[in-house]
Image (spheres, rainbow, N blue to C red):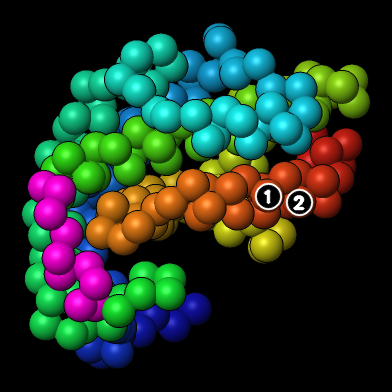
C-alpha cells in the first residue's frame, strides 16, 4: 500500500479540513466522551419502542442532567479543547473560506453572537443525546427480533449510522477517524444553525437506515 507524502496530501486538502486537524489529545477526549455516553445507555437506555419515540427523544432539549449529565466532566474537557478549533474555523468563514455548512454563506455565520464555547457545549450535548437515542433505538430493534445486543456491535453501528446513515455500516472503522469526524460534525453544527427541522431530518434518515439493516446478519 502506497502512502501519500504528508506535505502533498495536506496541501490538497480544503482549508476547513486543515483547520480542524485533531491532535491526539482531542481525539482521546471525544472517544472518552462517546464511550462514557454509550456505556451509560446499556445500563439505562432511553424508553424507545417506536420511530415516534425516537424522534421525540432526539427533539427534546438536551440537559446537563440524567444520562448526559454522567458525562459532564468529559464533555467540559472536550468543549474546552474544541473551542480554539471552532474559533479558527469561524475566522476562516469570516474571511470567506469555504466550509461544508449546509445552505449557508460565510457572512451569515460571521454574525454569531453566542460565545463559541456556549454554542459548542449545547451542540455536543445534543450530539451525545442523539448518539444515546440511536443506540437505545438499535437495542430495542435487536431485542424485538430476539437478538441480545452486543455492546461492540451496537457501539459500532451507532457511530457508523450517526456519521453517515446513507452508507453501509462500517463495523471496523478506525476509532480515531470516527472521533475526528465527530469533532468536525459538532464544530460545524455549532457554527451554523442546527434547527429543529435539521434534527428531525437527521432522525428520519437514521430511522430509514435502521430499517434497512439486516440485524440478524450483523449480530
Instruction: Describe residue 43's horizontal placement relative to residue 24 as left or right.
Output: right
Element type at marker 1?
Answer: helix
Q: Which mark is residue 89?
A: none
Looking at the rendering, which quadrant does residue 168 occupy? Answer: bottom right
Q: Is residue 58 above or below residue 86?
A: above
Q: Residue at x 28, y 52 (%)?
A: 190
Viewer-closest of 215 and 134: 134
Q: Specify whether residue 113 is painted magenta.
A: yes
Viewer-closest of 108 and 130: 108
Dominant secondary-structure state across the stretch colored magenta: loop
Magenta segment, which residues?
106-115
Can residue 81 be seen here?
no
Q: Nearer the viewer, mark 2 or mark 1?
A: 1
Q: Which mark is residue 208?
A: 2
Q: Which mark is residue 204?
A: 1
Q: Residues within 10 Å of mark 1 (few under 14, many from 20)?
A: some
Amino acid at each position: 500500500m502506497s502512502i501519500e507524502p504528508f506535505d502533498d496530501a495536506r496541501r490538497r486538502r480544503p482549508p476547513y479540513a486543515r483547520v480542524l486537524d485533531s491532535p491526539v489529545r482531542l481525539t482521546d477526549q471525544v472517544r472518552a466522551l462517546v464511550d462514557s455516553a454509550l456505556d451509560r445507555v446499556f445500563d439505562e437506555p432511553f424508553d424507545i419502542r417506536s420511530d415516534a419515540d425516537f424522534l421525540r427523544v432526539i427533539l427534546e432539549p438536551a440537559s446537563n442532567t440524567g444520562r448526559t449529565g454522567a458525562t459532564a466532566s468529559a464533555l467540559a474537557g472536550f468543549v474546552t479543547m474544541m473551542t480554539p478549533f471552532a474559533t479558527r474555523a469561524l475566522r476562516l468563514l469570516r474571511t470567506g473560506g469555504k466550509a461544508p455548512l449546509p445552505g449557508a454563506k460565510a457572512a451569515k455565520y460571521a454574525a454569531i453572537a453566542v460565545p463559541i464555547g456556549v454554542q459548542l457545549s449545547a451542540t455536543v450535548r445534543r450530539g451525545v443525546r442523539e448518539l444515546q437515542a440511536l443506540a437505545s433505538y438499535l437495542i430495542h430493534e435487536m431485542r424485538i427480533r430476539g437478538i441480545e445486543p452486543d455492546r461492540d456491535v451496537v457501539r459500532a453501528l451507532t457511530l457508523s449510522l450517526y456519521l453517515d446513515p446513507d452508507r453501509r455500516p462500517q463495523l471496523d472503522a478506525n476509532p480515531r477517524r470516527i472521533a475526528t469526524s465527530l469533532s468536525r460534525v459538532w464544530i460545524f453544527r455549532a457554527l451554523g444553525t442546527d434547527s429543529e427541522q435539521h434534527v428531525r431530518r437527521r432522525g428520519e434518515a437514521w430511522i430509514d437506515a435502521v430499517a434497512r439493516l439486516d440485524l440478524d446478519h450483523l449480530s
